[in-house]
Image: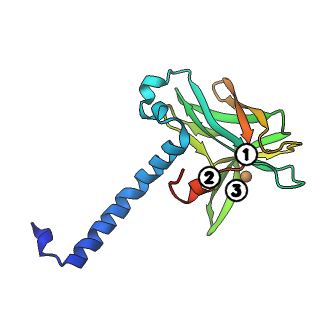
Amino acid sequence: MSWNTFGNSLGLVCSALILASACSPSNKVDENVSSATEPSTISQPDVSLVESAINIQNGIIRPPLGGKTVTAGYFTMVLGQDDRIISVSSDVAETIELHTHEMSDGMMQMRKVDSVDVNAGVPVVFEPKGLHLMIFGVNDVKEGDTADVTFTFESGRTASALFTVSTPDVSKDAGHKH
Ligand SMILES: [Cu+2]
């Protein structure tokens, strides 16, 4: 076809561009899914998720740096129905806020948000450099400890999950390592 009339180098550049643009959105989805939950849960959400399901996995609280009482928390959530996280609490913390981490004027900045929407069957990932829990007034937690974290939804439902005090695996941010 007409592709054959292009020089080799041009053909390579074009396909590289096509690959790059086609890849970025799907990479993002893959990353969410793989860091999210067991593949079995995600690959067939319609089968495994009943409407009332509240699935919270991989909950971790970053160990506070020496002397600090502020830290961050991460997890992945899948709901069986659309809902909205409106508050988060834990008995190891005074307050927990929902924060985004986004580019603003060329700088990464954290911003408090009042709520986070969760659509049915779509994993919402709280992770380093992304959405995260900002945890204030943390006392006396150390690596390996566990803590209950309770989520309240706009629907009025609540759900608790056991979080582990653990340093997030930063290699996951950089690439697709496990
Ligand atoms: Cu924050």
The residues bearing labels 2 and 3 have C-alpha atoms spaced at a distance of: 9 Å
Residue 166's disc number: 1
Residue nearer the viewer, 122 or 144: 144
Q: Is residue 13 left or right of residue 132?
A: left
For disc 1, does the CB lie below 8 Å from ligand 1? no
Q: Earlier in the sequence, mark 1 or mark 3?
A: 3
Q: How many labels sit on residues?
A: 3
Residue nearer the viewer, 112 or 20: 20
Q: Which residue, given by chain and number where applicable, does mark 2 sit on? A: 130
Q: Which residue, given by chain and number where applicable, does mark 3 sit on? A: 110
**The residue under label 3 is which amino acid type?**
Met
Residue nearer the viewer, 124 or 172: 172
Question: Above or below — where is 124 with respect to 69?
Answer: above
Percent position of residue 3, x then y: 15, 69
Q: Secondary structure at mark 2?
A: loop
**The residue under label 2 is which amino acid type?**
Gly
Classify 10 Å Cα crowding around label 1: few (below 14), some (14-19), many (20 and above).
Answer: some
Name the front one of labels 1 and 2. Answer: 1
Question: Above or below — where is 153 with respect to 127?
Answer: above
